[in-house]
Amino acid sequence: MQEVAPINTTIGTPQNTRVANALSAQDSSVRLQAALAVGSNPDPGFLETLVERCAVEPDFFVRDMLSWALTRLSPEITLPRIRHELDSERAQARSQALHTLSKIGDKGAWAWITRDLLRDAHDEVARTAWRVAVVLVPQAEKEDLVDELVTQLGRGDRDVRLSLSRALVDLGDVTEPALERAAANDDPEVATHARATELLRQNPETGFDAAIDEAKRVATLGPEGAAAAASAKTAEIEDC
């Protein structure tokens, strides 16, 4: 018999209590099925349990199902509870709360995406905040968001930088002036990331790694030298 760890629940009925306890079962497939069951039969009594599990659930697919189950509840009760999680000391709680906000898509939550979240020391929280901010930002505040996001250029590893570039590209043409300024930054990591992001904005089909390589060539050779090198390479390929 599958052993479960009891969790706090005020749901009441024996059947619902069993489902709630299954959300913390050792077997991730049991937890996944329990989250699916909760989402398929929305019950406000599960709100606290779902939020608590989001903060500690180790499996990505189960976490995603937990967020889906939360979206099945009324936003009137879900959003205030999720907002509380944005101030949690647990990084996963903040990240998953942001992820759930992106699924709900309520524009009223834009004001909750603070500078602290956009600059969160935990990369996964920051990456999720960037993605949610792009979804929720009002048109009139896009420039301010761009100015905030460009302060994070050059941050983290490849995946973190790719996430930031995608967020900036998704914001559209409003990013061009800020990226142009960042491309002149004294920090070569910032400048290269800014140039690569602008290349992606101009041509979204360009791969991120290719854009980084091109940005580095521009930094080394200058715009004209990089263009000449690209032309020479093209001619060499055509002659083969």
Image (cartoon, rainbow, N blue to C red):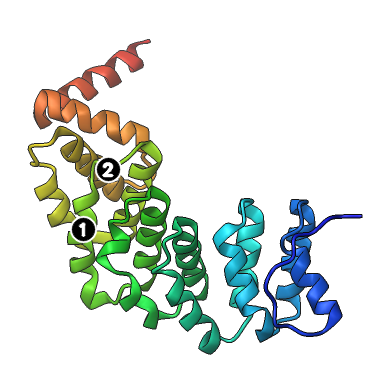
Q: Residue furthest right?
A: 1
Q: For the C terminus, which image quadrant?
A: top left
Task: Say the numbered circle drawn on residue 175.
Answer: 1
Q: Is residue 207 visible?
A: no
**In the displayed structure image, the side of residue 98 where residue 183 appears, left or right:** left
Task: Say the numbered circle drawn on residue 155.
Answer: 2
Q: Nearer the viewer, residue 76 or 142?
A: 76
Q: Mark 2 or mark 1: which is in front?
A: 2
Q: Is residue 156 visible?
A: yes
Q: Nearer the viewer, residue 134 or 217?
A: 134
Q: CA distance from mark 2 to mark 1?
A: 18 Å
Q: Nearer the viewer, residue 197 or 48?
A: 48
The image quadrant that residue 49 belongs to is bottom right
Crowding at label 2, few (<14), some or many (≥20) Cα neighbours within 10 Å? some
SS for tag 1? helix
Give the answer, above or below, for where 63 lies relative to 194: below
Crowding at label 1, few (<14), some or many (≥20) Cα neighbours within 10 Å? many
Q: Nearer the viewer, residue 239 or 144?
A: 144
Position of residue 186 measured from the top left corner of the image (x, y, whole percent): 7, 37
Give the residue displayed 23% in from the left and 46% down from the top. Answer: 153
Give the residue displayed 40% in from the left and 41% down from the top. Answer: 159
Give the answer, above or below, for where 37 lies relative to 60: below
Q: Amino acid at mark 1?
A: Thr
Position of residue 67 measured from the top left corner of the image (x, y, whole percent): 59, 67
The image quadrant that residue 9 belongs to is bottom right
Q: For the N terminus, which image quadrant?
A: bottom right
Q: Amino acid at mark 2?
A: Arg
Query: Which badge, 2 or 1, comes first in the chain's sequence?
Result: 2
Give the answer, above or below, for where 174 lies relative to 205: below
Give the residue displayed 34% in from the left and 17% down from the top. Answer: 238
**In the displayed structure image, the side of residue 46 where residue 224 appears, left or right:** left
Give the residue displayed 41% in from the left and 69% down from the top. Answer: 86
